[in-house]
Amino acid sequence: MARPRAADHEDKRQLILDQAARLFAAHGYDRTSTAMIAEACGVSKALLYHYHADKQELLFDVLAQHLQHLLVVVRGAADERFTPRERLENVAVALLEAYRDADAVHQVQIGCLGLLPPERQENLRTLERAIVGEVAVVIEDLSPEVRRDRRLLKPATMSVFAMLNWHYFWHREDGPVSRAGYARMAAALVAEGLPGAAAALREDAAAG
């Protein structure tokens, strides 16, 4: 008979993923040892290997969990009951909220995904493409120009991600623009240009 899981199994697994992401981001994948991760989690290396066969699997799981969560978030925000303009704003707000407290994982995604074996990289890139594809559908539904000239679709979609993905690099939670306010501004900039972006920022300032 298989031994039942401990009641805190998922909590410990999440702690390991969180600490691994933090250490990979701070020190790099190569300079982060399993001993360092185990120490940060307050567990033995033996327990660490109970959850993950090796450091490579741990890196993969950190990124896979993050990307799977983002895909669920984007699909929920892109609900077709809303107008395309509403969906774009919903997606931007939902993504930035999903990025909250995920700066370390985001840095690991940028810097370490390419260190995995090709087949594991492809698994993760499939998730990335699915996330981008969901947003591309919203952009296409929003814009007649994109529907007329599909060369615009990829650069327009990736511009949305460029605005959102680098938000962590400069934004301060106690600054003059809220997280949600910036997300709405980014959506407005795509949908209506600078006049729409300015209006979104004025609304954010009035609300907060």
Image (cartoon, helix red, strand yellow):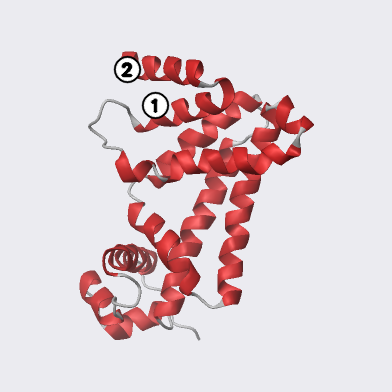
- Cβ–Cβ under 8 Å for marks 1 and 2: yes
Q: Is residue 4 visible?
A: no
Instruction: Where is residue 78? Give x, y as percent.
Output: 61, 36
In the rendered structure, the answer to whether residue 206 lies left or right of residue 78 reads left
Judging by the rendered image, the residue that carries numbered circle 2 is 205
Q: Can residue 13 be seen in this view?
A: yes
| Mark identifier at residue 203 | none
Instruction: Where is residue 61? Give x, y as percent.
Output: 46, 68
In the rendered structure, the answer to whether residue 131 lies left or right of residue 55 reads right
Q: Place residue 49 in its image quadrant.
A: bottom left
What amino acid is found at the position of numbered circle 2 in the picture?
A: Ala
* Badge 1 density bin: few <14, some 14–19, many ≥20, Cα 10 Å: many
Q: Looking at the image, which residue is at 28% across and 67% down?
A: 23
Q: Looking at the image, which residue is at 33% across and 45% down?
A: 169
Q: Looking at the image, which residue is at 43% across and 17% down?
A: 198
Q: Looking at the image, which residue is at 44% across and 60% down?
A: 109
Looking at the rendered structure, the secondary structure element under dot 1 is helix
| Mark identifier at residue 181 | 1
What amino acid is found at the position of numbered circle 1 in the picture?
A: Gly
Can you say which quadrant of the picture contains the C terminus?
A: top left
* Badge 2 density bin: few <14, some 14–19, many ≥20, Cα 10 Å: few
In the rendered structure, the answer to whether residue 12 lies left or right of residue 194 reads left
- Above or below residue 128? Residue 56 is below
